[in-house]
Amino acid sequence: MSKKILSLRFSAMGDVAMTAPVLKEILAQNEDLEIVMVSRPFLKPFFDDIPRLTFFGADLNNKYKGFKGLRALVKDLKNLGPFDAVADLHSVLRTFIIGGLFQLSGHKVIRIDKSRKEKKALVASGSKALKPLKLTVERYADVFRKLGFNASLSHQLPTKKEGDMCEENIKLLGTKTTSWVGIAPFAQHKGKIWGEQKAVALGKLLAEKKNVKVIFFGGPGKEAEILDECVKEVPNSINLAGNVKLKEELEIIAHLDVMVSMDSANMHMASLVGTECVSVWGATHHYAGFLGYGQSTENIAEISVKELDCRPCSVFGNKPCIREDYACLEGITPEMVYKKVVDAIDRD
């Protein structure tokens, strides 16, 4: 008898992206299972082409805003049921309310265990409990295990399916005749931002020493404006920020030889399409469990904890630097990242 599970995760972008490979593998292992994934509407491309997964885009800023809006959302979601259970992959006030409303009508709700206490100990000032915590993707899988489903994760990048690019992307980037490397130097919080100056220096090294086409990634607005200036300094480079939609961006990442990203969404987007990512970690640490799915720790660029015992100081990179100099990021040189990128290209 088939079962249908309602799955909830609204933010952040990278965390939502991490749910996709987990749900895909769980569905492959449970042929009688269907999943309705509820998230922000613009994140739908993360879940395209996953068999037996239906995506529901919930506009929480307008139609489903506030408590009244969440009640309307639950009503609309029930029309997609009946559901056997709710998998809360977020565990925040909004999903507590949604889950609670489903519980009132007799639905089982299982919520993710974020182990906030362990993460707090990992980044504590002074004596840190410096040990690898359970990966976030395994925490997602645990929710489905508690619901009785098979959920054995491979922790492997998917096989690349580059194929032909859409006409718009071909016009934007041209034909691929050399290695392509993406650089995404920004993140939501300052403790994770390597910055455009180092990104430009890295881009120059790649363009001049390896004849690499450098593709800059970022958000619209200020980031796009900054990257417009960066491409003027890096030969054979292009700025994608503000120029492509998410679906087209994923397609371009699939054609990259390597992505360079902070501990942020672009790392997780690379994982979705099977592209190796050299990730730059400052105030945060992969021990917190947020390394991109299937990505290698060998591709991490960081200042070791032995060299800088104040890191990690933040789970999300949102705490101000106690040293005030962000040595964890400033100490990561373009040459360090360049070597890891070249190593990754040569492995291919």
Image (cartoon, rainbow, N blue to C red):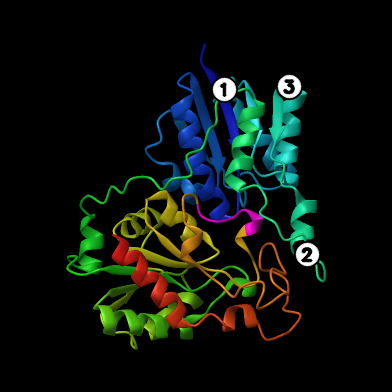
For the C terminus, the quadrant is: bottom left
Three-letter amino acid code at the position of disc 2? Lys
- Residue 182 location, quadrant: bottom left
Choose the circle earlier in sequence order: 1 or 3: 1
Q: Residue at x 62, y 20 (%)?
A: 84
Is 133 magenta? The answer is no
Give the CA separation, mark 1 to mark 2: 46 Å
10 Å crowding of disc 2: few (<14), some (14-19), many (20+): some
Quote the CA–CA distance across marks 1 and 3.
Answer: 13 Å
Please rate how many residues cluster around mark 1, counting C-alpha atoms within 10 Å: few if below 14, some from 14 to 19, many from 20.
few
Which residue is pictured at 59% across the width and 55% down the height? Answer: 290
Q: Is residue 93 left or right of residue 298?
A: right
Q: Quadrant of residue 218?
A: bottom left
Alpha carbon separation for disc pair 2 and 3: 44 Å
Instruction: State the residue lying farthest toward the right.
Output: 126
Residue 119 in the image, given as x and y percentages of width and height: 74, 56
Around disc 3, counting alpha carbons within 10 Å, would you say few (fewer than 14), some (14 to 19), or many (20 or more)?
A: few
Q: What type is the residue that disc 3 sits on?
A: Ser
Q: Earlier in the sequence, mark 2 or mark 3?
A: 3
Q: Earlier in the sequence, mark 1 or mark 2?
A: 1
Q: Which type of secondary structure does the marked residue at label 2 adopt?
A: loop
Magenta stretch? 287-292
Q: Residue at point 42% right, 79% down? A: 227
Q: Position of residue 268 (x, y in %)?
A: 48, 55
Q: Which residue is mark 2?
A: 128
Residue wearing tag 1: 81
- SS type, badge 1: loop
Q: Is residue 222 visible?
A: yes
Residue 265 to residue 154: above or below? below
